[in-house]
Image (cartoon, grey):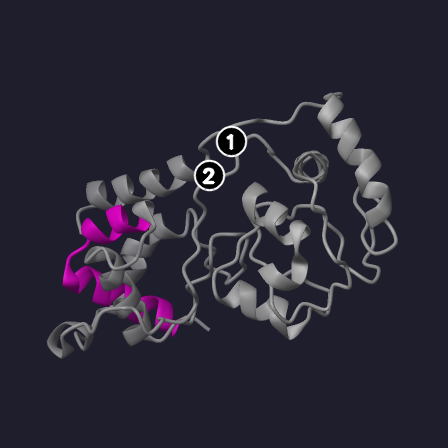
Amino acid sequence: MPARSARHAALVVCAVALWPSMRPAVAGDPEIERGRQVFLACQACHQVGSKARHRVGPTLNNIFGRRAGTLEGFNYSGGMRDAGQNGLVWNEAELSNFIEAPARHVPGTTMMYRGLPDEDDRTALVAFIRQHSPGPANLPETPPTEPLQAPAGDPDVPEHIVSIAGDPAYGEYLSGECVTCHQASGEDKGIPSITGWPARQFATVMHAYKSKHRENPVMRSVAASLTDEEIAALAAYFASIE
C-alpha cells in the first residue's frame, strides 16, 4: 500500500478517536456535584481519585475508552471478561446502561447491585466518574466494538483470498501507521489489541469490514483502502508478534 494511503487510514482512525463528546463535563458543574452525591452509595465497593484502590469492585479511574474486564490487578468475573472479549468498551451510554441494570447488561457479572433506575441520577453519576478519565471531552462517540474472535456472522471469505501468504516484512512496514492507534505491545486501551491474532482470523475480520458485514464506519474505511495482499501482509506480521 502506498505510504499516502496508509497515512490516510491512520489519520481517519485517530480523527475519530479525538471526536468531541456531545456534552463535555466541566468541573463545578451542578450535575457533577449531584453525581458526587450519588457516588457516595458506590463507595463501599468502588473508589476514584489519585489514592483509589481496588475494593470489592475495581477502581473507576480511566474507565472511559477501556475494554470491559481488562484493568490489570483486578480479578473480574467471567461474565465481565466475556463482555469485554465480545466488544464492550466503556463510554457514557454503556456505563449508564450497566448502572441501570448490571445483571441485565452484563450477564454473569458478580456486581451485587440491583441498579439505578433514575435516568437523571445515572447521567449525573456518569458525568462525575468521567472526571477521573483523562481527556474526558475527547472520547470517541463510536469506539471500536468488534469482538476479538471473528463471530459466526462474518462472511465466508473465499479460500484463495484468506489463504494468501502475506509478507511479514511488508506488513511490518504497513503497520507503522496502524500502531499509532492499536498498541504494538498488545496493550488494550479501548482500541483492541491485534497483536498475535491468527492470520486467517485477522484477514476474515478485515474482509468483513471491507464487505460492510461489520458496522464500524472507521474500520470500513480503513479496510476499503487496503488490497487483499496488503491485508494478508498485515495479518502475517501481527500473527508473528508474540
Q: Can residue 81 be seen in this view?
A: yes
Q: In which quarter of the image is residue 4?
A: top left
Q: Badge 2 local density, few (<14 within 10 Å), some, or many (20+)?
A: some
Q: Badge 1 local density, few (<14 within 10 Å), some, or many (20+)?
A: some
Q: Which residue lies furthest to the left in this view?
A: 160
Q: Main secondary structure of the magenta part?
A: helix
Residue 65 spot, x, y in % from top left: 55, 47
Apparent side of residue 109 relative to residue 230 in the rendered image (left or right): right
The magenta stretch spans residue 238: yes
Q: Mark 1 points at which residue?
A: 21
Q: Which of 120 and 20 is in front in this view?
A: 120
Q: Distance between the residues labelled 1 and 2?
A: 6 Å
The magenta stretch spans residue 15: no
Magenta-colored span: 219-240
Residue 74 spot, x, y in % from top left: 73, 65
**Pointers 1 and 2 in contact (C-beta within 8 Å):** yes
Apparent side of residue 111 relative to residue 24 in the rendered image (left or right): right
Amino acid at circle 1: Ser
Q: Which residue lies furthest to the front in this view?
A: 117
